[in-house]
Amino acid sequence: MENTATLNKMGTVPVKKLLLTMGLPMIVSMALQAFYNIVDSYFVSGMPGADGLPNAGECGLAALTLAFPVQMLMIAVGVGTGVGVNALLSRSLGQGDREKAGRIAGNAIFLGLCTYAAFLLVGLFGVGAYLRSQTNDPDILQMGGEYLGICAVFSFGAILSMIYEKLLQGTGRTVVSTCGQLAGAAANIVLDPIMIFGLLGCPALGIAGAAYATVIGQTVTFAVYALFYHIRNKDLDTRFSRLKPDGAAIAEIYKIGVPAILMQALMSFTAYGANLILGRVSPAAVTAYGTYYKIQQFVFFAAFGMNNALIPIAAFNYGMRDRRRVNETIRYGMAYTLAIMILGAILLQALAKPLMGLFSLSDATLALCVAAIRVITVGYPFAGANITYQGVFQAFGKGVRSLAVSALRLVVVALPAAFLLTLSSRAETVVWWAFPIAEGFALAAAVFLFRRLKKERIDRGMTNDGGGQMTEGGQMTNDK
């Protein structure tokens, strides 16, 4: 094995600049991912009513809200696997071990194919039972079944694009990921009105058209990533023979990836649980939450984009034993992420009514959407700090700690608090406070866990403040 780290910008460019040059393309890329759901919701909300279904647009939004947790689960498995790949790939390149990096990359693609096979089965056999667990409304069931069935059966583009994106990010090629997302988002935006409303000779497919536009856009993104990765990427061995399963490589990926998958899956579980809890308040509250959630993704996905830049930079420089650059990565990563979340909170507070007015909602649902924004954005600074700490834990192989913070934010505190607040006589306005409360509790835990990490891994475990090679006894381990 080569012991000299491959010359890479993640170990040479000043960290303050590096986080921006790598992070900004990732932020754009993540924002474009959020665009898929927003575009679908916007056009679906405008579907014309009929004699049998005068409120087709709002029923369609409700169907998208109920389908959303499964889409989030797809993202959870794809992104979670990618997090393990990203950290291991960057660390291996930092150590100069191109052979191991090639095996990690090949097995990542193999795992993406396995993930698609699982969601194909869900799309073919599990959609109806899942939707019936949340509603008995026949119109919403029919619409949700059409939309989710198509998105799951043709989910190969969504899942494999996430894997290839992490492979490109792990070698510092973040601009390519932005180009791929732009191409996919453009396809989705153009095709949505054509396929939903039946323009340019296309039959009017309604909510099924939104699903087809989405999967076509995802497939375009995947194609751009795959072509660049297999043709232009010189840092890795991209031969298809690398897809041969390697138990050791898969185990390493999932030592970091499984906690990350579970962490992302908690978002899906939270959305599903929130749908059930808010259903106790009113159907309008469920639709309001789903619509708000898609708007707030622009802010959170921007923070996740910066987090996705932090992880490979911190992991690479930990591989090189460069304590100074690791500390700078954490410090600037925190500052940039907090800036994103605070700016996002200010904009959403200022533009709450105009943003929600873009969707064809009833007055009651619109008022609930605005109320949700007014309250939930109060917790955005706490959320930004939590997201940064989770990224730091992942970069250092402390996936369980990252999972613990995520569980507190999204499930352990948020859902019980939401349930208790639904017992209030003012449930429609106070239930939203469950989310800022959960972020505050999680931040206290994150600070405690980070102090332990700093003492164990950075202050004591790293002695080199100026860059260098990985020592034999300094390899990162993955523990709890």
Image (cartoon, rainbow, N blue to C red):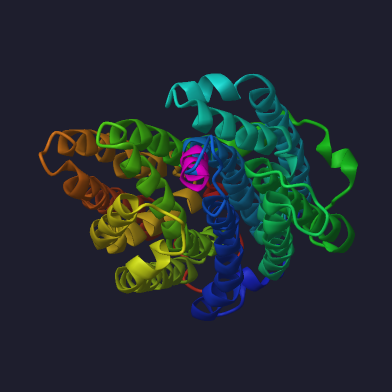
- Between 292 and 346, the residue placed more toward the observer is 292
> Could you tell me which residue is drawn at 36 percent across and 47 percent down?
289
Residue 53 versus residue 438 in the image, above or below: above
Identify the residue at image location x=52%, y=58%. Answer: 311
The verdict on residue 261 being magenta is no
- Where residue 42 sits: x, y (%)? 54, 57
For image coordinates 43% across by 55% down, the residue present is 392
Q: Where is residue 155 in the image (x, y as percent from the top left)?
A: 70, 39
Count up the numbered dots. 0
Q: Is residue 459 visible?
A: yes
* 45 with respect to 119 (left or right): left
Residue most toward the front? 51
Tell which of 78 and 333 is nearer to you: 78
* Left or right of 27 on screen, residue 242: right
Q: Indicate the position of residue 335 as horizontal and vertical percent values.
A: 37, 72
Q: Which residue is drawn at 27% across and 40% down?
A: 414
Depth check: 11 or 444 in front? 444
Inspect this view and state whether residue 348 appears. Answer: no
Whole-percent x, y for residue 386 in the image = 34, 55
Give the image quarter of residue 119.
Answer: top right
Q: What stretch is highlighted in magenta?
A: 56-65
- Specify the quadrant of the image occupied by residue 276: top left
The C terminus appears in which quarter of the rendering?
top left
Q: In this view, does 5 lie above or below 476?
A: below
Magenta stretch: helix, strand or loop mostly: helix
In the current view of this chain or complex, which residue is farthest to the left? 425
